[in-house]
Image (cartoon, coloured by chain):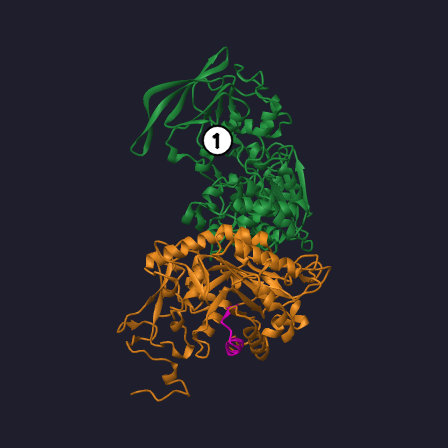
Amino acid sequence: MADIRNNFVGIKSPNPFWLASAPPTDKAYNVIRAFRAGWGGVVWKTLGEEGPPVVNVNGPRYGAIWGADRRLLGLNNIELITDRDLQTNLREIKQVKMDWPDRAIVVSLMVPCEEHAWKAILPVVEETGADGIELNFGCPHGMSERGMGAAVGQVPEYIEMVVRWCKANTRMPVITKLTPNITDIRKPARAAHAGGTDAVSLINTINSITGVNLDSFAPEPTIDGKGSHGGYCGPAVKPIAMNMVAEIARDPETHGLPISGIGGITTWRDAAEFMALGAGNVQVCTAAMTYGFKIVQEMIAGLENWMDEKGHASLDDIVGRATPNVTDWQYLNLNYVAKAHIDQEACIKCGRCHIACEDTSHQAITSMVDGKRHFEVIEAECVGCNLCVNVCPVENCITMEPLAAGVIDQRTGRPVSPVYANWTTHPNNPMAKVAAE
Amino acid sequence: MATGHFKQGIAGGRLSPEQYADNFSDLHPPLDHHEALVESDRCYFCYDAPCMNACPTSIDIPLFIRQISTGNPIGSARTIFDQNILGGMCARVCPTETLCEEVCVREVAEGKPVQIGRLQRYATDVAMAENKQFYARAAPTGKTVAVVGAGPAGLAAAHRLARHGHDVTILEARPKAGGLNEYGIAAYKSIDNFAQAEVDYVISIGGIDIQNGKALGRDYQLSDLTRNYDAVFLGMGLGGVNALRADGEDAQGVTNAVEFIAELRQASDLASLPVGRRVVVIGGGMTAIDAAVQSKLLGAEEVTICYRRGQEHMNASEFEQDLAAANGVIIRHWLQPKRVIAEGGKVSGIELEYTAMDGEKLVGTGERLTLTADQVFKAIGQSFVPAALNGSGALLALEAGRIKVDAEGRTSLPNVWAGGDCIYGGDDLTVSAVAQGRDAAESIHRATSNGRA
């Protein structure tokens, strides 16, 4: 049986599934329910500094987009950090940690960008017995207008400065949570690394408007006729998040820096993919908010089953395994040739591959053969683009089949070369390095 | 249970009022908004969609379903009505299981087609509930067209002609318009007087005058029409019913299924409709099923369909056969009627002979079977009655007993078109009649516009 116990920067949990800092982790009631359901840890919803509690809107906080059958694909929110009293949160954190010693409790923090504010909150959090802190440099709405959250996360110098303060003022591990609302995610990661962070976590939510009400002409979610951009999360953001995780994992400056992966993780498979790209564990929010805490049972069982099937003994066997395979376009093998192949037994003859190829790509799929409705790849036209695979409603009906070296590519009329050759040496590249003739 | 449930002979009041209401409620209840969205999500928006090609009126099914899924049922209805102005009724009565839904790729893939018929009903219901009219008449052409019969073919032709600016007069023999939609469909397939609502919806385009109680051959002749109108469209359907060719056929209690179905549709009180305790229906088509199922729903204790060939030869679709079975109707095959047995002039049973195929030929085996019955329905097909065409002067060419037409619906007579069940080569489907009426109207429009169209 695969061992899925997690040790993330010294914080131990029975599995790598943590609940992200968000509404599900705002109070003891929810966190206890999560632990009962099996979650390995939580990042407690962001605490602010001592003083009058934060105020939230009293109308809708969430907006969403949906796929077929109204399956929730993306969620956004304009909720702020915890609106509960600091002392109440601290008391509850202490109690829950005491009652659930085997689970990870990390406390998310967001206070003004001044050293005294951080110095004030760190000891009181430490006193709860929490396992670590996560610096919320990510929230894109509300708090950022007050110089916190993403307003800090978008300035690498601020990140480095605050991380340094925290490392100097607490013994707890520091996880720096990054905002994706930035052009190059490596810059804030490098800054956090420079400041001495123990880990980064990403992504926080993405600036977004989920919809526009076409009667009132107001963005959704709408508060009395107006709307504000919210933070976007859920399955729709997963590809964006995975790319950012991979960019940090393969950046020579931050390579090896522990990463807690966040962004649309809904199933064990999503989690495994994040971890393969370099995440040491994962944090989940939207999936729990959509289906409840029970989903962690599927995640645990699914991850264990996959690891058993593949012979991976522990999480160390999978974390970062895909990172070396993430590269730049210029290093992709241009001599690799694949062609689409349609399994006629599996084909249900919807014709979507044909019309996608015919209208928008390379006219490489038939619609009619000998007067019969028939969809088949014309190899002489197929560039192997994969669009047909992606639009086909039947899984594994269309597959990309690589051509073996020496086989004639019907499209070019030339045999497939066995030699790896990329753009850096390609004759059409004016910047090409001299090819080894 | 009502007291009359097991009453001998042909009697009404076999059930309680609640049972009648329940038995004759909507066969396929309409999809509500949520159900329509969920179902529309299942459509793959196929290229050159098989469903669309299977539809006799070529409705752009993927497009109308996509319009439902994007919250535009009105646009969806227009997509449907563009091809089939009787899309509302077709959504209810089309044998979708042998047309669009049979070839749906989801049927092929998982045995569960997208419920195209019910989605079509959803969209057309929304538009008709709002009385949303999509079509305006073109400038008046000054041309007049006579349409014989206010059934699906005639109504479709009239609507398309009116759109083109022609003035249309529909001559209908029955007291109400609608043809088989009004008189020939099982009551549970079209409730709430939908057929009349649809007629009203269709003719509200204007330029269509329906005259009821006007029968061809009785009240006017075809030659009157060709003389007084620029063009004539014949869509009078089938007036005759095939005989059993069994002895004693004239006994009391032997009824034409089509008349029973018509009577049932027109009944204001189902309890007043008499039905036998033991009913035998002779035939293997939709009419046989409709008569049998409705007999059962009216409270008949025992209903048996006897068909002279095998299950695979039945014209009734598999769905219809299952519907009959689910309602407790027994379907027996390879039996042909030989003699109606009567007591005191009233049916008391029917004697049948077993049949078998002798090569290509159906033959009686000589073995006989007697079923007790107090009512026998004849549902062995309808026929075209050409007598009404007499007096037209020139003779209208027929083929296999029905009117011969070309691909555009032109008959052998100049300026006379025909469509629907009365023509040769059709499939006796409402939706095909609509297509033929529509296409004949386009042909009439081209002809009367001297090729300018």
Chain of the residue where label 1 is placed in the rendered structure: B
Residue placed at 59% from the left, 47% from the top? B34
- Single out the residue that lies furthest toward the right: A224
Instruction: Between residue B129 and residue A418, name the one nearer to us.
Output: A418
Which stretch appears magenta? A187-202
Report whether residue A370 is seen. Answer: no
The verdict on residue A384 being magenta is no
Q: Residues within 10 Å of mark 1 (few under 14, many from 20)?
A: many
* B321 left or right of A188 in image: left
Q: Residue at x 58, y 54 (%)?
A: A28
Q: Which chain is orange?
A: A
Residue pushed farthest left?
A406
Residue that badge 1 annotates: B289
For the residue pair A418 and A235, the one nearer the viewer reads as A235
On screen, residue B199 above or below A395: above
Residue B23 coordinates in the image, percent (x, y): 56, 29
Percent coordinates x, y for residue A184 in the rendering = 53, 77
Where is residue A109 shown, x and y percent of the image? 59, 67
Chain in green (letter): B
Q: Nearer the viewer, residue A253 or B183?
A: A253
